Amino acid sequence: MTTALWLTIAAIFVLIVFSGFFSGSETALTAVSRARMMQIEKTGDRRAGIVNRLIQYRERLIGAILLGNNLVNILASALATSLFLTLFGDAGVVYATLVMTAIVVVLAEVLPKTWAITDPDRFALRVSPFVRVIVALFGPVTMAVEALVQRILNLLGANVVEGRPVLTATEELRGQLDLLHLEGGVFKDDRDRFGGLLDLAELEVSDVMVHRTKMETINADDPPEKIVADVLASSYTRLPLWRDEPENIVGVLHAKDLLRSLNMLGGDVAKLDIAAVSSPPWFVPDTTSLKAQLNAFLKRKTHFALAVDEYGEVMGIVTLEDILEEIVGEISDEHDIVVEGLRPQPDGSVNVDGAVPVRDLNRAMDWNLPDDEATTIAGLVIHDARTIPEQGQVFTFHGFRFNVLRKQRNRIATLRITPLR
């Protein structure tokens, strides 16, 4: 073989190496975690800063890499065709096609991309200085190509200039959590906590409040002895005070303030002034988002609020603990009364009280029942059935069978839920 042929072979080899470099770089820079790169950049690694600037303009980056990859692939194929024509005549075209296809697929595509995807962060850090030069060289060409492509797509009716991302940042985070949970990198409890934090902006006070039918309240006109006895008998430290009618909340009595006042009076309950001990009630709309309510609790340095509807009627109580439980799960202490609202059965079904919140059921059973239209599981059944079910009725919604086991007046007391898959 002549020197010219050896030089051609060497040139093809170098071009294949460049093609592998472009393929691996594209895979690594599109798969790299921008969050990790930002953390690495804070440690002083200049290459991480280069990566962040490259992926900030992802379209231009991919355009430059694709342009470079196509140039070296086409040039390598042309040189290989010329080489095989010289060696084998007209049949060299077939040989060149077969050989170059195999080499490009194995050495310039699959191998570098597999290498890059196994550790995209490290790969991206290593290639970023070189890719930055390539993007700078091919920048004007890629910008022209982008403009041409956008014009063609606009003519076809696709508006890519003002296109918005399909997923919001919250949805992307939630998707990443679900993926990491499936892969075993994040445990269910951790995923639920992250998910609860993301849900704060979407949930309202009405979704987590203690409904007024379950509120523990105290009549401010009762004798001080009875009020003290009621406070001591309660499992709560803060209790609303009402006068004339239960809906007329006039204050909030804190057990600690009550005990402090009794201590100052030497234990003489008869001298106790309940109105002086209680604090003014704080009313908030039941449509307030949990994120806004959490910030309000922190700003006011208080833990307790009364939720009212659009007509000013008291609908329930919301506390800081209620909101925190949406993030970390149920918080129980030695004074909490444990209510068995969820009872798994041997056949895989679950007996559940109608008042159990859908979100709590989803969290406990790792289900995905919708909670947009109803807060409790009984409310979900009534909403989907479009009627108040009778005892013994069976419904099938959302991949589950709901059997009404017990009913009290117009309220569903107990349900049996069976997954259908």
Image (cartoon, rainbow, N blue to C red):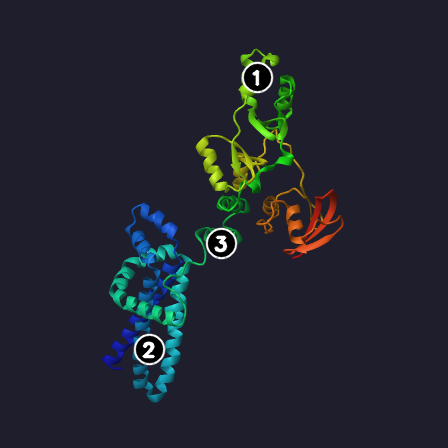
Residue 115 placed where, x, y %?
39, 61
Q: Residues within 10 Å of mark 2 (few under 14, many from 20)?
A: many
> What numbered label is drawn on residue 77?
2
> What numbered label is drawn on residue 143?
none
Closest to the camera, between mark 3 and mark 2, is 3
Viewer-closest of 82 and 345: 345
Residue 415 placed where, x, y %?
70, 47
Q: Amino acid at mark 2?
A: Ser
Q: Amino acid at mark 1?
A: Asp
Viewer-closest of 19 and 210: 210
What secondary structure is found at the residue carrying circle 2? helix
Quadrant in which the C terminus is drawn: bottom right
What secondary structure is found at the residue carrying circle 3? helix
Viewer-closest of 85 and 389: 389
Total numbered circles: 3
Q: Quadrant of residue 69?
A: bottom left
Quadrant in which the N terminus is drawn: bottom left
Q: Which residue is at a point 67% across and 38% down the rendered structure image?
A: 340
Q: Earlier in the sequence, mark 3 or mark 1?
A: 3
Gap between marks 1 and 2 measured at Cα = 95 Å
Q: Earlier in the sequence, mark 3 or mark 2?
A: 2
Q: Which residue is at a point 31% across and 55% down the rendered structure image?
A: 53
Q: Is residue 56 left or right of residue 298?
A: left
Q: Amino acid at mark 3?
A: Gly
Q: Is residue 303 above or below residue 100?
A: above
Q: Which residue is mark 3?
A: 175
Q: Residues within 10 Å of mark 3 (few under 14, many from 20)?
A: few
Q: Are marks 3 and 1 in contact (CB under 8 Å)?
A: no
Gap between marks 3 and 1 measured at Cα = 55 Å
Q: Which residue is mark 1?
A: 273
Gap between marks 3 and 2 measured at Cα = 41 Å
